[in-house]
């Protein structure tokens, strides 16, 4: 059986430099099925923390998904989901907003993505949620088949 590092077109084993050109896939993943009630300040949403050590000169795609984000029951209210570096008050990398135009608690899925390239030091990424008003108790609604997720994927060299 050939080595998994074999170039089938030539039968040669790929060099380390050639192997480094490929995406490496999922590096870190956090999931949660626990509902999370939003506040008016950005707070790390339940279960949405990952720590990894990026390899220098590689790109990482960070994706944060909340399957169902409620909005406050006030006209013009909104719900946000953000990807942040280090903590709830750390550097904001990406944001997604659900806005209501009338008094309503109907929301939808929220997805944030960010392309990251870091150095080889331990890095913590968090998914945060916030709302413009707690009226109507906005919630990130989750479940066993409706998971929130924070995913870090190595997608290749810079």
Image (cartoon, rainbow, N blue to C red):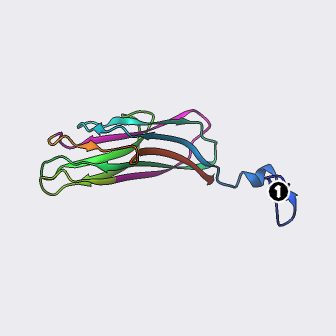
Q: Quadrant of residue 42?
A: top left
Instruction: Give the image location of residue 15, x and y in percent.
Output: 82, 52
Label 1: state its secondary structure: strand
Instruction: Give the image location of residue 139, x and y in percent.
Output: 26, 42
Q: Is residue 111 above or below residue 35?
A: below
Q: Is 70 positioned to the left or the right of 11 in the image? A: left
The residue at the far right in this view is 11
The residue where tag 1 is placed is 6
Q: Main secondary structure of the magenta part?
A: strand
Q: Is residue 155 visible?
A: yes
Q: Residue at coordinates 87% horizontally, 59% vertically from top-left?
A: 12
Q: Quadrant of residue 142?
A: top left
Is 121 in the magenta? yes
Instruction: Give the image location of residue 65, x and y in percent.
Output: 40, 49
Residue range highlighted in magenta: 110-134
Is 88 in the magenta? no
């Amino acid at each position: 059986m050939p080595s998994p590092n074999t170039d089938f077109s030539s039968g040669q084993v790929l060099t380390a430099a050639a192997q480094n050109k490929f995406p490496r896939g999922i590096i870190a993943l956090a999931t949660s099925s626990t509902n999370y009630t939003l506040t008016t300040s950005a707070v790390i949403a339940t279960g949405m923390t990952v720590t990894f050590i990026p390899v220098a000169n590689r790109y990482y795609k960070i994706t944060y998904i909340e399957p169902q984000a409620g909005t406050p029951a006030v006209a013009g209210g909104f719900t946000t989901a953000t990807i942040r570096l280090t903590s709830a008050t750390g550097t904001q990398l990406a944001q997604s907003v659900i806005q209501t135009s009338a008094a309503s608690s109907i929301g939808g899925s929220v997805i944030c993505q960010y392309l990251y390239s870091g150095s080889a030091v331990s890095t913590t990424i968090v998914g945060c949620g916030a709302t413009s008003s707690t009226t109507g108790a906005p919630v990130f609604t989750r479940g066993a088949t409706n998971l929130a997720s924070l995913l870090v994927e190595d997608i290749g060299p810079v």
